[in-house]
Amino acid sequence: MPEISQQSPAQIQSAPATKNPEEILERIFTVTPKASPAEQAERALRRPKQLIFCALSNRNFYWRHHITKFVLDEGHVPVVPFMLFDYYLLHTVPKETMREAINNLIVRCDQMWVFGNMSLGVKVQIGIAKRLKKPLRFHDITDMPYRVVSVPEAMLREE
């Protein structure tokens, strides 16, 4: 059998999986070079991901990491205000400044996903997204951290 480097791409694709333990160990322990910053940028430009604004009430603040992971696992880029600004920067800036920053994020995101019951602030954020005609998805997080369930808007309660 010819060496891999001498095979055509069609031959490589049709070649059976290697059963030799030494070759498997070699593949496992071969260092894979990290993509350069230019290669990483090119990959992002060729396959951009949707920015998802994650709306959640203050009462669900502690689920922010799980929500971030959920959106990443769905193949998107999460924008979670509580991850960016913690809990309103520990109330060290005026609330109006925080609201303005958050509203700017909503404008720049491709979609809004709502997690858990809706507080007044979340309802206002949903109103902004609707006026901007952003796609919306609603999620029940009652069973967090084990599962997140996509639901219709009417199923989420008001706080």
Image (cartoon, rainbow, N blue to C red):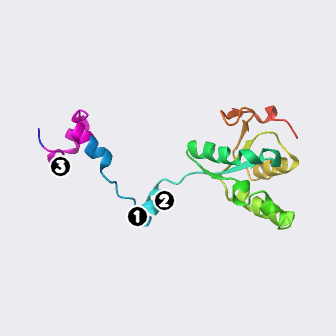
- Residue 113 position, x and y percent, is 70, 44
Above or below: residue 61 compared with residue 45: above
Residue behind mark 2: 45
- Residue 7 position, x and y percent, is 16, 44
Q: Amino acid at mark 2?
A: Leu
Q: Quadrant of residue 66?
A: top right
Q: Is residue 7 left or right of residue 51?
A: left
Residue behind mark 1: 36
Q: Is residue 129 magenta?
A: no
Rendered residue at 77%/59% (across/down): 103
Task: Name the secondary structure under disc 2.
Answer: helix
Give the extent of the magenta segment.
3-24
Q: Nearer the viewer, residue 159 or 87?
A: 87
Which marked residue is nearer to the observer: mark 2 or mark 3?
3
Task: Name the secondary structure under disc 3.
Answer: helix
Task: Name the secondary structure under disc 1.
Answer: loop
CA gap, disc 1 to disc 3?
A: 24 Å
Q: Amino acid at mark 1?
A: Ser
Q: Nearer the viewer, residue 139 or 50?
A: 139
Q: Which mark is residue 5?
A: 3
Which marked residue is nearer to the observer: mark 2 or mark 1?
1
Rendered residue at 42%/66% (across/down): 38
User: What crowding class fits label 1: few (fewer than 14 Cα within 10 Å), some (14-19), or many (20 or more)?
Assistant: few
Q: Is residue 72 left or right of residue 111?
A: left
